[in-house]
Amino acid sequence: MMYRPFRSFGRLVLAICAVSLSTVGLGAQTSAATAPASGANPSRMDIFMGTSYLYTRSQLEPAGIRYSPMNLGATGSFAYFFSTHRFNNHLGAEGVYVNHVVNHSAPSDGAVSLSGGPIYRWPVANNMTVFAHGLFGVEQLSGPDTSYPPALVEFESGKWGFGMTAGGGMDIGLPFFNNRFSLRLVEIDYRYSHVNYGTYAGLPTPAPATLGGTTNLNALELSTGIVAHFGHM
């Protein structure tokens, strides 16, 4: 089971991502005639480093304990773009690492993600590029954390499971170092994770025993940071 209002919101985010991908795909058919001059020789590789905020209202089941937002996030990605005239050199492959660390001094949950998949970029102005991506990989979740202040239920230790991400964002070119860098103004992603913590032990669970159960985590992730560009198509 998952929190119903957020499950509906997650479906809405997925629908928005699907529409965005369709729009980008249609734009690829006409971008040769409409793309600005700056898109004539785009970068071959992009490296992104930044920070992120993960918001969720999902719960650990069957205990019904809700996860808390994870606001201590660091994220990085590497994208390589292919020389394909069919997609006007805008299609590539991307690998992403995200780490929302656990803060043991206050109620906090943690998430680590390793994923990869296709990315499509689309120049829309002289110094502006939008992109969309779909990623699949593994996710390590820790929590929900109810161990601060001391409680009978301790947070679940980190377990690995399946994860997927769908979303996109916007990069703004910076007029420094021969346009080597861009500001990732915003990246908005829907993230889904499934993690099995083992057999459910029931409440209350004396510390330091783990509670067990499963999680179907639906989350909205917001990221920002700096993109470095290397090479040319």
Image (tube, helix red, strand yellow):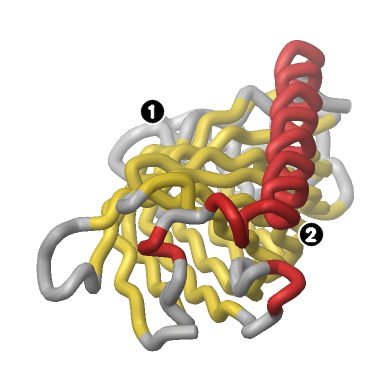
Percent across and percent down for residue 4 are 81, 15
Earlier in the chain: of badge 2 and badge 1, it is 1
Residue receiving disc 1: 149
Residue placed furthest toward the left: 176
The residue lying toward the viewer, choosing from 219 and 133, is 133
> Which tag is nearer the camera, tag 2 or tag 1?
2
Q: Is residue 165 visible?
A: no
Residue identifier under label 2: 162
Residue 32 visible, this orientation: yes
Residue found at the far front of this picture: 33
Q: How crowded is mark 2: few (under 14 residues within 10 Å), some or many (20 or more)?
A: some
Quadrant of residue 176 within the rendered picture: bottom left
Of residues 49 and 208, which is closer to you in this image? 49
Q: What SS does tag 1 mark? A: loop
Question: From the viewer's perspective, is residue 4 above or below residue 36?
Answer: above
**Residue that extends furthest to the top in the rendered view of this protein:** 5
User: Of the residues shown, which amino acid type is indicated by label 2?
Assistant: Phe
Percent across and percent down for residue 33 are 60, 56
Please tell me which residue is depicted at 88% across the width and 49% down the height of the picture: 199
Q: Which of 15 and 196 is in front in this view?
A: 15
Nearer-the-camera pick, 51 or 69: 51
Q: Which amino acid does label 1 sit on?
A: Pro
Q: What element carries label 2?
A: strand
Q: What label sits on residue 218 in the rendered view?
A: none
Q: Residue at x 78, y 52 (%)?
A: 195
Q: Residues within 10 Å of mark 1 (few under 14, many from 20)?
A: few
Tell whether 217 sits left or right of 233: right
